[in-house]
Image: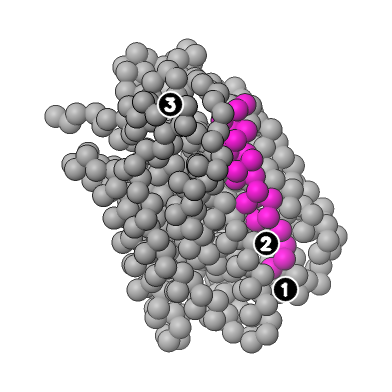
Amino acid sequence: MLGLSRFKATDRVLFIICLMYLVTYIDRVNIGTAAPAMQKELGLSNTELGLAFSAFAYPYAFFQIAGGWLGDRLGPRLTLLICGAIWSAATVMIGFVEGAVSLILARFILGIGEGSAFPTATRALSNWMAADRRGFAQGITHAFARLGNAVTPPLIALLIVALSWRDSFVIVGLISFAWVALWWFYFRDDPREHKHVTQAELDVLPKMRIASERRAVPWRRLLKRMLPVTLTDFCYGWTLWLFLNWIPSYFLHQHNLDIKKSAIFASGVFFAGVVGDTVGGVVSDRILRRTGSVSKARVSVIVVGFLGAFLFMLPVLFVTDLVTIALCLSGAFFFAELIVAPIWAVPMDIAPQHSGTASGFMNFGFGLAGMISPVVFGAVIDATGRWDLPFVASLGLLLLGAVLALRMRPDEPFLDDEEPQAAALTSPVPVRPTA
């Protein structure tokens, strides 16, 4: 019988983190599929629904930085125990809301819980992954996130038809609580303290200092160093929020599909993202092993992702055939998701000693996009009745993102003020030799 005993401790930790990405995205995007039923029962306008979408993003953006700092200070194990309990409880709470105000409040609490998750997971991965597996690790974890995107529409639609939209939130919230228990039971902040890790695994992991130290964060200098990455992530995030929040409703209203058919088309688009996440990580790591250049490995894949997403999204404004639009959106989402693995590897490349905080700075851009874009989308749709117009802003930001990505410079490691001589410590760990 196959079991986890066949895998190394590093593989099991990576799998558990993958499960976290899966459940957090189910909890995050389930409202997109449940929205039509919720609007009907609660009497919500598209603008009010957009406010509920964006209510998640405000604390989510703030806790990218605060939560990343907590992950660096408290360690990933305790941080994810706390924030996991918060996001799980908030998901259950949505099943009991009675109107726009309580829905917005529950989504706000959900953003508090999930805001710390990805930066803290990045801190965990920086301890548990060798340098030439960082791209793959970020790719596979975000592939599970997109798998969550893909399975959520049919899963939530099934639960709504079989039970109710309220029960769907309660059920997925309880699943999240189960993941929190698994995390606390198995994970350890320092791989050397894990009873199942082998010496062969430890030999390729980061040095002991990076894995275990708690050092002061040079906030201003680190923010300045990460700013180009933050702006690039904003451009990516704008498009992702469009897909996550509005694609199911887009198929439902723009093309007059029922909830089951719109869920199927939305799932097809999101499955393309699963492939894109994985491919982006594998290609980025392969370029790193072949060239030894962190900049080529990360930046080139990100630029291709932005430009490819632009080219595939453009026909959506001019084409009316449903199948063609679905294929174009799938292609656009595939290329957009090529960006994810390399851009999440960049904070680990630049500042592994502050990877939680650095990734929080980066993903603040994603959260900021989430504050603005859902409200803009809802207002535009209410004002015009057109569901294709929100794609226009995404097209411009995709081109801008391709330009900004050239300024990230992941090949230049961040050095702490007090340790200018520590370049060897903070620079990317040398890749393992290949046969």
Left/right placement of residue 40 relative to residue 393 reads right
Earlier residue among tags 2 and 3: 2
Residue at numbered disc 1: 47
Judge by depth and name the residue closer to the eye, 42 or 244.
244
Left/right placement of residue 109 relative to residue 420 reads right
Q: Amino acid at mark 1?
A: Thr
Magenta range:
50-74
Q: Amino acid at mark 2?
A: Ser
Q: Residue at x 48, y 16 (%)?
A: 194
Crowd around label 2: few <14 · some 14–19 · many ≥20 (10 Å): many
Position in image of residue 245 (x %, y %) = 60, 64
The numbered dot on residue 54 is 2
The numbered dot on residue 419 is 3
The secondary structure that most of the magenta stretch takes on is helix
Give SS at disc 2: helix
Above/below status of 28 relative to 72: below
Position in image of residue 274 (x %, y %) = 42, 53
Q: Is residue 133 visible?
A: yes
Above/below status of 400 relative to 151: below
Q: How far apart are the alpha carbons under marks 2 and 1? A: 10 Å
Earlier residue among tags 2 and 1: 1
